[in-house]
Amino acid sequence: METKKQVSLKQYNTFGIAATTPLFVKVTSSLVLQEVLKDVRFKDSFILGGGSNVLFLKDLSLPVIKIAIPGIKIIEENEDVAIVSAGAGVVWHDLVMWCIANNLGGIENLSLIPGLVGAAPIQNIGAYGVELSDVFHNAIGIGREKGGSRIFYLEDCEFGYRDSIFKNELKDSYIITTLRLSLTKKNHRLNIDYGALSQTLEEMGVHSPTISDIAKAVTRIRSQKLPNPELLGNAGSFFKNPIVSNQKIKTIQNKFPGVPTYPIDGNYSKIAAGWLIEQAGFKGQQHGNVGMHKEQALVLVNYGNASGSELWNHAQRVIAGVKQLFDLTLEPEVNLIN
Ligand SMILES: Cc1cc2nc3c(=O)[nH]c(=O)nc-3n(C[C@H](O)[C@H](O)[C@H](O)COP(=O)(O)OP(=O)(O)OC[C@H]3O[C@@H](n4cnc5c(N)ncnc54)[C@H](O)[C@@H]3O)c2cc1C
């Protein structure tokens, strides 16, 4: 294994923050990963995928293990369903495209989400009405303490909205090396009811969409809507949409009748965090090197060479502004790394 000392992580995170790590290693297989974990220097380390959901608050004191495990294949199938296995280092969107090319349905709505396959179960990635948990079969993780492997099935993962056991009880306990998805080979369950999806398909002149059409529509919407991290540093939605009681929503509606809500069950609903941020006056407002994007209030942006702490200070200003106006506390979706 080849290790490097004092490495800048600027090219390894989509905020483009120039934090450094004292030691860096790329792992290209589970075996190499197990070797690395035996090395005492890597006992406590930070696991890095595509760096699209992290905010480095300062230079890291920890070594970094960069996941680069490749490979996509079908490992099991019947007439209706195929189980696809992908290495944790595969680029998520490449997996989506591979599935579309092989007419396997289930993740087309998750097109163009940045990052790598191994991070997908960590926050149960989701978009346009679909979450990873809808197609999750299992994942293999290597235990960081002892280096043994464990298979996690759906019922083990405690998936929730941008949440899983890997962010809670098993935080920093396992490194995902392989993800397996259960995908349809025919009679795909199309999901086009969310957001602008059906409208975009109509604009594309598509009346009976295929999974490929849906992937194209999602890609089109996302490319128009979200700032490209290669041009403007960001990590997508910085905050989660708060989940609040319907009683609390009524109180907010008395003052703000237009508040956008999405029912979860009879008692709770999600409120669009971007709308809360806009109402609090932060949309498009630049503060030195940082700010909330002018079209996407939920996206925290690095306009120049901002440091992690500058970005986090701004996020805290936004949290305070929303708290003051709505008595709601926004929680970051992005992982803050000290
Ligand atoms: C423009 C933009 C749009 C986005 N849109 C969406 C969206 O629509 N929906 C959505 O859900 N997310 C979205 N995201 C967030 C991000 O793409 C996802 O969270 C993605 O899964 C992160 O993958 P990553 O490989 O970059 O993870 P990283 O940022 O590298 O890591 C994220 C966390 O997972 C841990 N981790 C990474 N790999 C592993 C592994 N193999 N094993 C164990 N832990 C690991 C890291 O330690 C870290 O805590 C967006 C981000 C951007 C920049």
Image (cartoon, rainbow, N blue to C red):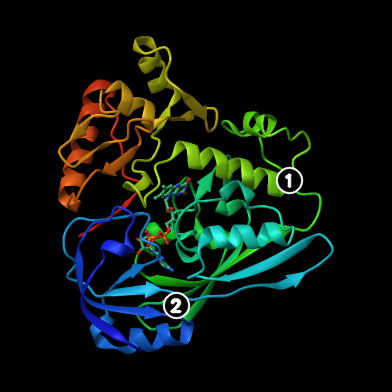
Label 1, on which residue? 189
Q: Nearer the viewer, residue 245 or 316?
A: 316
Quadrant in which the C terminus is drawn: bottom left
State whether residue 88 is above or below residue 99.
below
When the figure is inspected, residue 201 is found, relative to residue 95, above or below; the finding is above
Residue 168: tell me if it is visible.
no
Where residue 10 sits in the image (x, y, percent)?
A: 26, 62
Answer whether residue 307 is visible to the viewer in this image: yes
Circle 1 SS class? loop
Residue 302 position within the rendered picture, expressed as x and y whole percent measured from the top left: 25, 45
The answer to whether 40 appears left or right of 26 in the picture is left
Q: Name the N-terminal-most of marks 1 and 2.
A: 2
> In the displayed structure, would residue 235 be above or below residue 101?
above
Query: Residue furthest toward the right?
Result: 79
Q: Is residue 249 above or below residue 25?
A: above
| The label number, if any, that marks residue 68 in the structure image | none
* Callout 2 secondary element: strand
Q: Residue furthest front?
A: 231
Neighbor class of circle 1 (other Cα within 10 Å; few <14, some 14-19, many 20+) is few
User: Ligand 1 appears in which quadrant?
Assistant: bottom left
Residue beneath the point at 51% across and 28% down: 262
* Residue in the picture at 23% in, 84% down: 41
- Residue located beneath label 2 in the image: 142
Q: Position of residue 18 (x, y in %)?
A: 21, 61
Q: Amino acid at mark 2?
A: Ile
Q: Closer to us: mark 1 or mark 2? A: 1
Choose between 90 and 162: the one closer to the eye: 90
Q: Nearer the viewer, residue 179 or 172?
A: 179
Callout 2 crowding tier (Cα within 10 Å): few <14, some 14–19, many ≥20: many
